[in-house]
Amino acid sequence: MFVFAYSTLFGFLSILFFYALWLPLVLVDYRKVIGNYARFYWILPFAIFACMSFTWSAAPGVTLRAGIQYVTTIICALIASRTIDARTFLSGVSIGVALVLLYSLGFGDYHYDPLDGSYSFVGAFSSKNQLGFFASLGVYFVFASFLIVRTSRLWRCIALLCGILSAYCLVASSSATSVIATLATLVITAVVGIVLKFSPKNRRSFFLFGLAIALVLMAVAINSGAIDLVLGAFGKNSTLTGRTYLWQEGLRASHQSPLMGIGYQAYWVQGFSEAERLWNEFYITARSGFHFHNTYIEVLVELGYVGFVLICLVIVGVVLGFLVRLLTEEYTPQAHLMFGIALLLLIRSFFEIDFIQPYTIGSFLLYYSAGLIAIPQRAGLRMMHATRLAGQQ
């Protein structure tokens, strides 16, 4: 978690440490760590396509380097999905988030946004939305520690402290995307938890009924102007602080190479006229760390409609995969926990690009989740987890 948050600050040594945690496990027991890689047929195509896009990229060197980094990040996430059980995953992420946020509180700073004239706490990040993302994860995992995964009283006390810290940083970041996505994820995950109290046969009926009600309420909210009220509460307007303009520019740029794009991470390159123009318009003096604030538009520009279909296959496959398990199979805390994470990533994907870049927590979480869908953790881990719970009881 700490490396994902601050690798840009600590450089390549932190990345080597990340690789050292996971890649050597392949040499220990390849079959148990990787499993049947043919089961990843719907997971890997996007990453492979992104890596191979250097052959037609406008910046082939940038694309090849970033593509290799992205593929290796995914490999590590898939290894983790085979070796880390739900409780270890929950505690590890929670403690990691706490360390990340404490570092930001100790060495962070405020940032002035010239677009809306406001100051917000960004911590040790360059964006309040990144700080908000880690805080969102902290809040969600504390929620899971009490309502999803069975944990000890000691851990709940620790989790509560992590939750207070995360909630404070979430509010301090003033990130509307993070706050709204977190609240929506908590509400939907809690409602799904209520539905799961019923038998698998009745779950589907209750879920479909609840989905219909949610769609009706959403339509009413849109027509009544509730969205503008919510945006106004965060100091936003209908342009989402210039994001709608960015989306228009991104869609326009995607028309240059609609089928396969201009290459993975080949748009935001210093010296390229369009990137320089947008950096200048949005006061990005560093001329880096900027994007279209929409995962699917970013993919359309870089990898065209082919990449768009492939990334949708991954995110939709993960969300629906865990949802189907919850509605049709016996209840497992792991599926419930990971459904919430996938849902959070899905909601944020319309405003951020959390899981299409290397060395980011969003990419790691998405492909960790995908690995659990493709190849469930081996029986040994589940039996060990069950035995440990029985011993605590």
Image: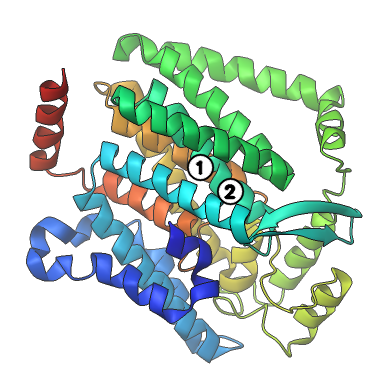
Asked whether disc 2 touches disc 1, contact meaning CB atoms under 8 Å apart, the reply is yes
Left or right of 124: which side holds 341? left
Find residue 30 and report its horizontal and vertical position in percent.
Answer: 11, 65
Check residue 137 in the rendering and tell me which mark sits there, or answer none.
1
Q: Is residue 324 visible?
A: no
Amino acid, disc 1: Leu
The CA span between labels 2 and 1 is 6 Å
| Vertical comparison of 209 with 154: above or below | above
- 125 or 328: nearer the viewer: 125
Seen from the viewer's position, the closer of residues 24 and 228 is 24
Task: Give the residue at mark 2.
Answer: 133
Taking depth in this image into account, of 343 and 112 the one nearest to the observer is: 112
Quadrant where the image shows the N terminus: bottom left
Q: Quadrant of the C terminus?
A: top left
Vertical arrangement, residue 359 with respect to residue 232, above or below: below
Task: Please tell me how crowded label 1 is: few (under 14), some (14-19), or many (20+) other residues with Cα within 10 Å.
Answer: many
Viewer can see residue 173: yes
Left or right placement of residue 265 versus residue 218 in this view: left
Q: Amino acid at mark 2?
A: Phe
